[in-house]
Image (spheres, helix red, strand yellow):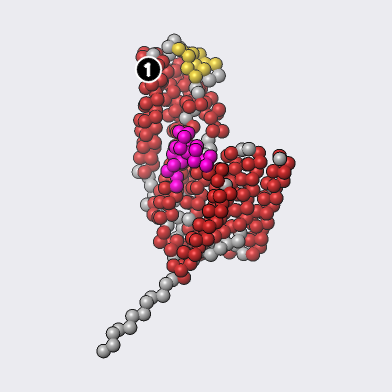
């Protein structure tokens, strides 16, 4: 008898579409990386050399993990170019251009990340973007931001510290950011503002809020509550340094503060916040996000026709034109 004839199973359209789509995305990202290399270099310097932004080094791994969680649903989709995504890409490049023209790193860096998001949307399509919406949005945490909050946080920390110092029976006077006590004069410096604590806490709780909760009310409560806890905890740390200094001296108290806050205090507070929140989670991380079927039935697809495409692309073109006008005016 002749051997059985084995007919190989046909590959699904999605399986054949992904390699080509990812190749196009890699080319688009490479071109954008070359164009915005100065911004990526500056961001990498901030991530690595400025301790306020050291937590950003974890963000690429977190994004990769989030995409991995959605891998089965992404595999069921056929990625296709989506022209309106070029509008988002154009708006990102416009923001990048304006940031460079005005010499504002934060604006240029935000535009850089936005352009990469737009390239992903334009290359892989709206359905893929809906399934991978949170990883795409979480890329915003690649942008080093938070320095703008330092003056406000310094003032808040100083006010909390002087109030707690008085409550603990230590006589003290405050003059702006300077607190005068019997053990010596203290200053709430930029390093004492707690901004790195706040930004890292927000980044982590946003991740937990999305992956662990379905209710937007609970998500908002977690992020806002964690931000408040981080600010109050920083005030307690500053007060603790002043209080301890009354008995051991400023130098020993400052060394204690650096060790405890840098290595222990932050870890204890954030572990406590995440541990308490974890008791109330409503789902497993793998359940977060839209399924392929939900993406196919999403109402946004009904409005993604040619008129929307034209409108979004026109918006991108206008944004680019405005950016170049700003560049011409500045230069």
At a point 66% along the width and 62% down the height, the residue shown is 307
* Position of residue 189 in the picture relative to residue 91 (left or right): left
At a point 43% along the width and 63% down the height, the residue shown is 75
At a point 42% along the width and 72% down the height, the residue shown is 11
Report x, y in % for residue 116. Answer: 54, 51
Asked whether the viewer can see residue 244, the reply is: no
Report x, y in % for residue 135. Answer: 47, 51
* Position of residue 305 in the picture relative to residue 137 (left or right): right
Q: Quadrant of the N terminus?
A: bottom left
> The magenta stretch spans which residues?
41-60
Toward the viewer: 282 or 175?
175
Report x, y in % for residue 296. Answer: 50, 64
Q: Quadrant of residue 58?
A: top left
Label 1 element class: helix
Q: Is residue 242 magenta?
A: no
Toward the viewer: 249 or 113?
113
At a point 48% along the width and 67% down the height, the residue shown is 17
Magenta stretch: helix, strand or loop mostly: helix
Label 1 packing within 10 angstroms: few (<14), some (14-19), many (20+): few
Q: Residue furthest right?
A: 329
Report x, y in % for residue 283. Answer: 38, 51
Residue bearing mark 1: 252
Q: Is residue 56 magenta?
A: yes
Asked whether the viewer can see residue 147, the reply is: yes
């Amino acid at each position: 008898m002749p051997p059985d004839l084995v007919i190989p199973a046909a590959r699904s359209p999605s399986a054949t579409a992904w390699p080509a789509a990812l190749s196009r995305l890699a080319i688009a990202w490479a071109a954008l990386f070359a164009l915005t290399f100065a911004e990526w270099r500056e961001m990498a310097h901030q991530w690595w050399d400025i301790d306020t932004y050291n937590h950003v080094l974890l963000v690429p791994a977190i994004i990769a993990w989030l995409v991995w969680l959605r891998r089965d649903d992404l595999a069921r989709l056929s990625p296709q170019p989506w022209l309106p995504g070029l509008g988002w890409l154009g708006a990102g490049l416009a923001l990048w251009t304006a940031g460079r023209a005005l010499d504002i790193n934060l604006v240029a860096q935000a535009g850089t990340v936005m352009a990469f998001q737009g390239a992903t949307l334009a290359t892989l399509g709206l359905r893929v973007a809906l399934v991978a919406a949170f990883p795409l949005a979480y890329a915003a945490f690649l942008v080093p931001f938070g320095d703008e909050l330092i003056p406000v946080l310094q003032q808040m920390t100083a006010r909390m510290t002087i109030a707690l110092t008085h409550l603990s029976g230590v006589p003290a006077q405050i003059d702006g950011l300077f607190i005068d006590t019997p053990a010596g004069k203290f200053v709430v410096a930029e390093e004492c503002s707690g901004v790195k604590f706040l930004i890292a806490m927000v980044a982590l709780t946003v991740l937990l809020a999305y992956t662990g909760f379905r209710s937007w009310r609970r998500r908002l409560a977690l992020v806002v509550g964690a931000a408040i806890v981080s600010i109050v905890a920083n005030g307690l740390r500053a007060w603790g340094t002043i209080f301890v200094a009354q008995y051991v001296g400023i130098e020993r108290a400052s060394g204690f503060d650096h060790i405890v806050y840098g290595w222990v205090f932050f870890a204890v507070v954030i572990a406590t916040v995440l541990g308490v929140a974890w008791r109330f989670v409503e789902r497993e991380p793998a359940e977060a996000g839209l399924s392929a079927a939900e993406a196919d039935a999403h109402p946004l697809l009904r409005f993604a026709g040619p008129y929307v495409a034209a409108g979004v692309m026109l918006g991108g073109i206008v944004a680019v034109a405005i950016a170049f006008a700003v560049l011409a005016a500045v230069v």
